[in-house]
Image (cartoon, rainbow, N blue to C red):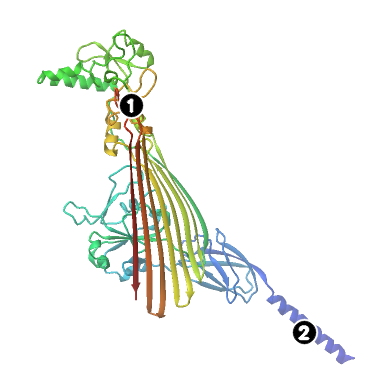
Amino acid sequence: MYSNLKLRTLLSLSILMGNMLLAQAQDHAVRGKITDAKTGELLGNVTVKVKGSSQSLQTNADGTFSISTNPNTVLIITSTGYRPYEVKVGQLNQLDIKLESKVEQMDEVVVVGYGKMKKSNLTGSVSSLDKKVLETGVRSNPASALAGTIPGIRVQQTSGRPGAVPTVVLRGGTTYGGGGTPLVIVDGLIRNGFNDINQNDIESIDVLKDASATAIYGARAANGVILITTKRGKEGVSNITLSSKVGVNKLNNPFDFLSAKDYLNWSRKGVQVSGQYQPSQLNQLTSVGPFGTGNKYKDDKGNILDGNLTSNAVWSTMLLDDTNRELLQQGWQTMIDPVTGKELIFKDFDYAKYALRDASLTQDYNIALQGGNDKGKYYGSVGKYNEKGMPINTFYDRTTFVLNGEYKVKPWLHSLSGVNFAYTKWRDAINGEGNYMTRALGAPPTMRGTNANGDLLVGRDYQDGNPLVNDDKFIRKNLNQKLTLTQAFTINFLENLSLRVSGNWFFNQSTSESFNKDYIASPGNYVRTRNSSASYDKIYNQTYNAVL
């Protein structure tokens, strides 16, 4: 009896101990928070993986995570740019993990002609653009981001039209006049510029300045080399990024122009003085013109004149009399003529209000997907950029698409593919930008502007007058399409021996169309001849490389 009781007691204790051990081995919830060891910044999208299994997750945007596991579990924490971290769960319910950065400034990797090198191993002159520069501002061209950010480089914006490409010169240039633009290479392919590249898709911009850094490119690199690398996928990351940037452009006009009253005062005084030496100059005071009094409001029969039909109704300056006194009710002004002492009537007309926008809007939208694992990585994006110019009806519009992928086919075979497409369309000022801005800001303020019916007047002629009159008569279409395809394979024979075979295909197609409807060339002169022209340009390049 005693032995049976002892046996039952031992059996009960064994079952109890087994249950306790089983309970210890059961899963329990573990919460954690991951931060940057140096800055304390909460790290989102960090990969938390259970060692020895396929179970993994990513931290939330605030760096927190929750996982159900047992005390014997070891968690592996990985994130791009940080050292891997392992921690055993044990009996802890809360983990506070701090990751250390594995990026050292002196060992920053930069792109050079032959591939990538650490900065500490470089002997040539190479400068890299800070990534934060590309993340701020709205630009149609990433070349603008180089201004004031890289030593020895001069970026000069010689045109204000939307989508304009600045001039880039390294170390003063190589020509007598200090010109000569650098060679531009995007993902290993030579390009004729970077106005079709979305700055949101750029991973890095490296500038090679001296002969030792540019030697691989030969004579083409005499003016330096700008290497652009687009973004790639990242292992252990799965992100969808949506960015929206809006900018407002205002005209930088440091000049305070004369009003119509001041313009008449000083112009007529100036002619009076010059007439003392050249009497023929005095004829301007009474002739048809911006400050002469020979302009007319009505003809001899009392009919109101139309400035689009007769040149003596273009300007507003006249001697005040009964034929034009009614114009005072329409906002016209009067002043005492500094030359004759008689009363002048005139209209203050602001040409710029018709030729230029008060402000132009720039919009930049981009959506990108990025991710990958130990087998493959991907990056894809679609971008939309639209910029309105200061001159009326001018614009630059660009749509971009980028897809870059990497795949480890075999342990010894690595594939890299890329697609880069850009579609742009634009419209420039009709009569040339330089003349356009000069006329818009410097036109005499005594132009009549409109006729009695409120119709806009062309002015002296269509090139010198109000551009809004004929703007819809000039049809202009400019289109450009660029497509780049890249495929490369890397075969690893040994640890330090590999063969890289690559091919690049570049397609560029440009179309320009022009058509003129009937338009007013000058008062009383209508051009009825229809002019039409079109140009078409197509470029196709292939590049193949093999590097052992």
- Crowd class of label 2 (few under 14; some 14 to 19; many from 20; radius 10 Å): few
Q: Is residue 187 above or below residue 285?
A: below
Q: Quadrant of residue 126?
A: bottom left
**Circle on res. 350:** 1
Which residue sits furthest front?
A: 529
Report whether 28 appears left or right of 178: right
Q: Amino acid at mark 1?
A: Asp
Numbered disc in front, either 2 or 1: 1
Where does residue 9 sit, x and y in percent of width and height?
82, 85
Between 348 and 288, the residue placed more toward the observer is: 288
- Crowd class of label 1 (few under 14; some 14 to 19; many from 20; radius 10 Å): many
Q: Amino acid at mark 2?
A: Ser
Q: Are marks 2 and 1 in contact (CB under 8 Å)?
A: no
Q: Which residue is mark 2?
A: 14
Between 450 and 36, the residue placed more toward the observer is: 450
Where does residue 253 sit, x and y in percent of width and height?
31, 35
Where does residue 504 sit, x and y in percent of width and height?
37, 64
Residue located 26% across and 35% down the image = 435
Quadrant of image for the N terminus = bottom right
Q: Quadrant of residue 525?
A: top left
**If you read the primary sequence from the N terminus, does the residue marked by circle 2 or circle 1 appear first?**
2
**Residue 82 in view (yes/no):** no
Between 255 and 216, the residue placed more toward the observer is: 216
SS for callout 2: helix
Instruction: Report how many numbered discs are placed on residues in the image.
Output: 2
Which residue sits furthest left?
A: 277
SS for callout 1: loop
Between 527 and 546, the residue placed more toward the observer is: 527
Quadrant of image for the C terminus = bottom left
